């Protein structure tokens, strides 16, 4: 089947799907960069608030896709299948010039495979972590995508070797965040004293993560406050629902007396103002690296999910700073090792060892420079080349 050519005198129609906050950020930057080339382009699919603000039309809330873990996905399977069917029907009927799936590989790659078989161009933005686990997924990727956009430098060689067209574009966050961060400026913005000792706590953006980590992080804050009752805990939360869940845990553990600062959003500001960041494993750990703050990383999934996936990991670490550096540079406490005692000690190690944080800041600055590539513009250029190849 022949690919549909862009219509004369109009911009391309681009179907685009993001599954969570990090994908929404990537999608919005890409849409804005593509509009420079195609002012009349039309964007539609599944978009978060930032993508919608950039002009994308969404057929469903992005939160529909914001689930993770094998067992957790099964609980949401009916709504995911319904959305998948609706997207496929929309794309088959309207035949966009290109479909761009942003991350969410378990959802997007299946759609991309069917669309590619139907002669619709497909691009996937952010490679699944085939370098970390399940490397055999590259075969499915080859069948699903016409082009892969990569955000980590070491991924290019993997795709070249597998014969999958791909372009390393760099990481958008590395472009958006300056190399030098003025901690005191952020503290002034948040009305925090320069001399205050501040911990940013990021329990995740999904309710599943809040359910798994809220109790652990409140308990850790309790232990930390015993060492220093004046510690301030900044907790940026993405929604009313996640804030309510975290507040519930504060009350459940009688931790109301701690110096909490619960915030709606503003995770960047909270991390930049902090001395140490305690956070769930995910994209936010990369942001902590880019704002040059020492991070302590943790994560838990259901025991059944963990048993199903633990034997499939290739790398000994899970967080992006460690993966990018190729060694442990930030401590990780996953599953059974995710205890309040372990997290508390790791945070205290940073608070009490300034030379450790200075060395880490130097390393993070070097990695930041490696990731700066004007990612949105490079991604838009790669998309344009795919469109022009028709």
Image (cartoon, grey):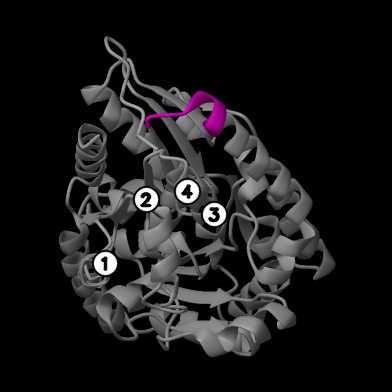
Check whether the beta carbons of the residues at disc 3 and disc 4 lie within 8 A of each other: yes
Q: Nearer the viewer, residue 9 or 3?
A: 3
Question: How far is disc 3 from disc 4 in space, using C-alphas?
Answer: 5 Å
* Residue wearing tag 3: 110
2 or 4: tag closer to the N-terminus: 4
3 or 2: tag closer to the N-terminus: 3
Q: Measuring from the top left, give residue 140's x and y in whole percent.
A: 45, 65
Is residue 371 in sight in this rendering?
Answer: yes
* Residue wearing tag 1: 159
Q: In which quarter of the image is residue 168?
A: bottom left
Number of the label disc, if any, that sits on residue 125:
2
Question: How far is disc 2 from disc 1 in space, using C-alphas?
Answer: 13 Å
Question: How far is disc 3 from disc 2 in space, using C-alphas?
Answer: 14 Å
Q: Measuring from the top left, give residue 101's x and y in whole percent.
A: 45, 46
Q: Which of 106 and 234 is in front in this view?
A: 106
2 or 1: tag closer to the N-terminus: 2
Q: Nearer the viewer, mark 3 or mark 2?
A: 3
Identify the residue shown where x is 56% and y is 26%. 93
Q: Is mark 1 on a helix, strand or loop?
A: helix
* Residue wearing tag 4: 112
Q: Which of 203 and 17 is in front in this view?
A: 17
Q: Is mark 3 on a helix, strand or loop?
A: helix
Is residue 191 in sight in this rendering?
Answer: no
Q: Give the range drawn in magenta.
A: 91-97
The quarter in which the C terminus is drawn is top left
Q: In which quarter of the image is residue 235?
A: bottom right
Q: Which of marks 2 and 4 is in front?
A: 4
Report the label total: 4
Q: What element carries label 4?
A: helix
């Amino acid at each position: 089947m022949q690919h549909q050519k862009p219509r004369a005198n109009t911009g391309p129609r681009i179907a685009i799907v993001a599954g969570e906050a990090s994908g929404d950020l990537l999608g919005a930057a890409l849409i804005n960069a593509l509009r420079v080339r195609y002012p009349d382009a039309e964007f539609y699919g599944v978009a978060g608030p930032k993508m919608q603000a950039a002009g994308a039309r969404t057929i469903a809330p992005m939160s529909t896709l914001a689930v993770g873990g094998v067992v957790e996905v099964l609980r949401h399977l009916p709504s995911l299948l319904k959305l998948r069917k609706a997207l496929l029907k929309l794309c088959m009927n309207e035949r966009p010039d290109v479909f761009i799936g942003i991350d969410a590989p378990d959802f997007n790659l299946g759609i991309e495979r069917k669309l590619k078989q139907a002669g619709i161009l497909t691009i996937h933005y952010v490679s699944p972590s085939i370098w970390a686990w399940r490397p055999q997924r590259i075969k499915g990727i080859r069948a699903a995508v016409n082009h892969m956009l990569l955000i980590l430098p070491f991924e290019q060689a993997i795709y070249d070797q597998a014969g999958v067209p791909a372009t390393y574009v760099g990481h958008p966050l590395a472009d958006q965040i300056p190399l030098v961060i003025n901690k005191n400026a952020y503290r002034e913005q948040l009305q925090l004293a320069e001399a205050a000792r501040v911990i940013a706590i990021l329990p995740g953006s999904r309710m599943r993560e809040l359910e798994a980590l809220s109790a652990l992080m409140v308990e850790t804050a309790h232990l930390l406050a015993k060492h220093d009752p004046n510690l301030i805990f900044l907790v940026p939360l993405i929604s009313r629902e996640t804030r309510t869940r975290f507040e519930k845990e504060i009350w459940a553990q009688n931790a109301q007396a701690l110096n909490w600062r619960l915030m709606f959003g503003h995770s960047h500001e909270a991390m930049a103002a902090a001395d140490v960041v305690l956070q769930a494993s995910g994209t936010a750990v990369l942001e902590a690296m880019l704002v040059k703050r020492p991070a302590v990383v943790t994560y838990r999934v259901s025991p059944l999910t963990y048993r199903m996936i633990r034997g499939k990991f290739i790398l000994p670490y899970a967080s992006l700073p460690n993966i990018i550096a190729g060694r442990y540079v930030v401590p990780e406490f996953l599953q059974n090792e995710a205890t309040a005692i372990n997290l508390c000690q790791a945070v205290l190690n940073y608070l009490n060892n300034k030379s450790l944080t200075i060395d880490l800041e130097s390393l993070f600055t070097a990695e930041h420079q490696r990731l700066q590539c004007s990612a949105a513009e490079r991604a838009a250029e790669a998309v344009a080349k795919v469109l022009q190849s028709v």
